[in-house]
Image: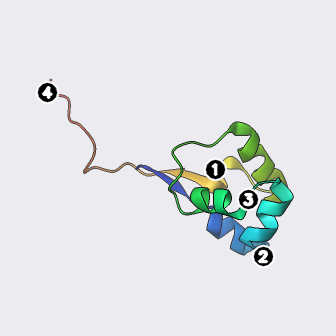
Amino acid sequence: MPIIVNLDVMMARRKISLGDLAERMGITPSNLSILKTGKAKAIRFSSLVNICEILDCQPGDILEYRPDTTERKTDPD
């Protein structure tokens, strides 16, 4: 997947644990862990806003696009 989740990096910079962030967001640690490990297929903007407010960061600090050349389909033209 070309979208990289850097939530663990921002959490470390802000010195906040997964449990503390999940509690402040009002979600379970297991649901937050799915996002943190990059296993989530989607994230709601409201959740992203909540994370950014709590961690005092920008969405680009959490999510990164890194093209994966092994999955890229080439155009025959």
Label ID, residue 60: 1
According to the picture, the residue beneath numbered tag 2 turns out to be: 15
Mark closest to the chain's N terminus, 3 or 4: 3
According to the picture, the residue beneath numbered tag 4 turns out to be: 76
Q: How is the image coloured?
A: rainbow
Mark closest to the chain's N terminus, 1 or 4: 1
Instruction: Identify which amino acid the numbered label 3 is placed on.
Output: Thr
Q: Secondary structure at mark 4?
A: loop
Label ID, residue 28: 3
In the picture, the quarter occupied by the C terminus is: top left
Residue at x 67% of width, y 39% of height: 44
Q: Quick check: 53 left or right of 40?
A: right
Instruction: Identify which amino acid the numbered label 4 is placed on.
Output: Pro
Label ID, residue 9: none
Q: Residues within 10 Å of mark 3 (few under 14, many from 20)?
A: few
Mark closest to the chain's N terminus, 2 or 3: 2
Instruction: Identify which amino acid the numbered label 1 is placed on.
Output: Gly
Question: Do the numbered discs 1 and 2 sit on residues whose CB atoms are within 8 Å?
Answer: no
Give the Cα separation between the discs numbered 1 and 2. Answer: 19 Å
Where residue 74 sits: x, y (%)? Answer: 20, 35
Residue 33 lies in quadrant? bottom right
Instruction: Identify which amino acid the numbered label 2 is placed on.
Output: Lys
Give the Cα separation between the discs numbered 1 and 4. Answer: 33 Å
Question: Do the numbered discs 2 and 3 sit on residues whose CB atoms are within 8 Å?
Answer: no
